[in-house]
């Protein structure tokens, strides 16, 4: 039987490299299948959910802005998806939708691959309070780190995320997206993660003001090179973009659907080719 998969998201999903990455993994594993890019409007999501239940796909990935909406439509949430109320991976089992979240483990694995896992006494700052940011925060709490500060343009959203994830390890606090509060948090930061679509010119800080031992991570992987990562490296800081996280979360999704651990080197090569 041919394995049919897809990724569902907003208009930006049309340029996703996920199809290239997953289809390369299928070929390497001897699996016949396809991976489609499904750009959906909000009003098209119910029909897509019905297609999943009807067996059109064996599984799917989910990206912005539908992670919480798909989580609400699932029959069961497993692991981190239940904690975050956000799903990036759905498997279809006899018409039942099983939701998972591989972003948490994928982020930490991406840091490990780059040799940049933070020290246990590090203080972390996460920019953003959406689904990707929540996954990053939970990943850092488990890494573990000593404390996490969440900074978002909407203070109420930052406070809500911080409140939901308290009790998962270190202290989690919220701060406003302005230079004064951001720099107060960054003064002792061991790692800063941009989990927003914002680029370098929108950051509420200058990378040259970060502590020299600070690591800068960005969940974005395009356009390459990622501007924040370039600026951090030029300032002498360790820095990494989101390509490693993408490969690692994709590999975990692939294993959920197929029961097979795909070759990471094949997936990395496919991603690099797609981003070049």
Image: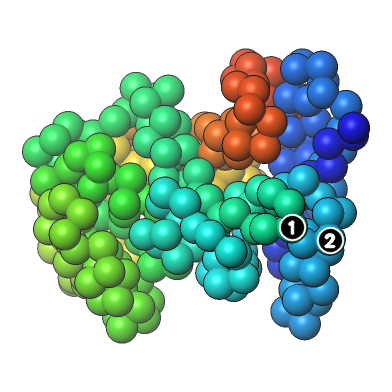
Figure coloring: rainbow
Q: Which residue position is annotated with label 1?
A: 95
Image point (75%, 17%), residue name: 29
Relative to residue 149, is residue 91 drawn left or right?
right
The residue nearer to you, when weighing 249 against 59, is: 59
Residue 54: mark in rendering: 2
Image point (42%, 23%), residue name: 113
> Where is residue 173, by image quadrant?
bottom left
> Where's the N terminus, which quadrant?
top right
Residue 206 appears anywhere in the view: no
Q: Is residue 121 above or below residue 184?
A: above
The percent position of residue 158, horizontal first and vertical second, equals 31, 73
Q: Is residue 265 above or below residue 118?
A: above
Residue 59: mark in rendering: none
Whole-angstrom CA distance, mark 1 to mark 2, is 6 Å
The percent position of residue 177, horizontal first and vertical second, equals 31, 73
SS type, badge 1: loop
The residue nearer to you, when weighing 178 against 23, is: 23
Count of numbered badges drawn on the protein: 2
Instruction: Report if the CB atoms under discs 1 and 2 are less than 8 Å apart.
Output: yes
């Amino acid at each position: 039987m041919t394995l049919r998969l897809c990724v569902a998201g907003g208009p930006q999903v049309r340029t996703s490299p996920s199809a290239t990455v997953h289809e390369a993994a299928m070929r390497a594993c001897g699996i016949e299948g396809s991976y489609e890019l499904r750009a959906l409007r909000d009003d098209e999501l119910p029909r897509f959910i019905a297609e999943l239940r009807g067996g059109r796909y064996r599984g799917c990935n989910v990206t912005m802005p539908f992670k919480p909406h798909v989580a609400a439509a699932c029959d069961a949430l497993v692991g981190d998806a239940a904690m975050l109320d956000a799903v990036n991976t759905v498997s279809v089992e006899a018409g039942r939708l099983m939701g998972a979240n591989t972003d948490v483990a994928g982020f930490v694995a991406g840091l490990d691959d780059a040799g940049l896992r933070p020290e246990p006494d590090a203080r972390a700052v996460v920019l953003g309070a959406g689904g990707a940011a929540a996954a990053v925060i939970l990943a850092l709490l488990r890494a573990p780190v000593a404390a996490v500060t969440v900074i978002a343009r909407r203070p109420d959203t930052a406070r809500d995320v911080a409140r939901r994830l308290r009790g998962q390890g270190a202290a989690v606090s919220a701060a406003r997206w302005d230079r004064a509060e951001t720099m107060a948090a960054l003064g002792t930061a061991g790692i800063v993660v941009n989990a927003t679509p914002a680029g370098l010119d929108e950051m509420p800080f200058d990378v040259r003001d970060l502590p020299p031992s600070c690591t800068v991570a960005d969940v974005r992987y395009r356009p390459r090179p990622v501007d924040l990562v370039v600026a951090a490296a030029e300032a002498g800081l360790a820095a990494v973009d989101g390509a490693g996280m993408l490969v690692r979360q994709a590999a975990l999704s692939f294993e959920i659907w197929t029961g097979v651990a795909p070759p990471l080197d094949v997936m990395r090569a496919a991603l690099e080719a797609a981003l070049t």
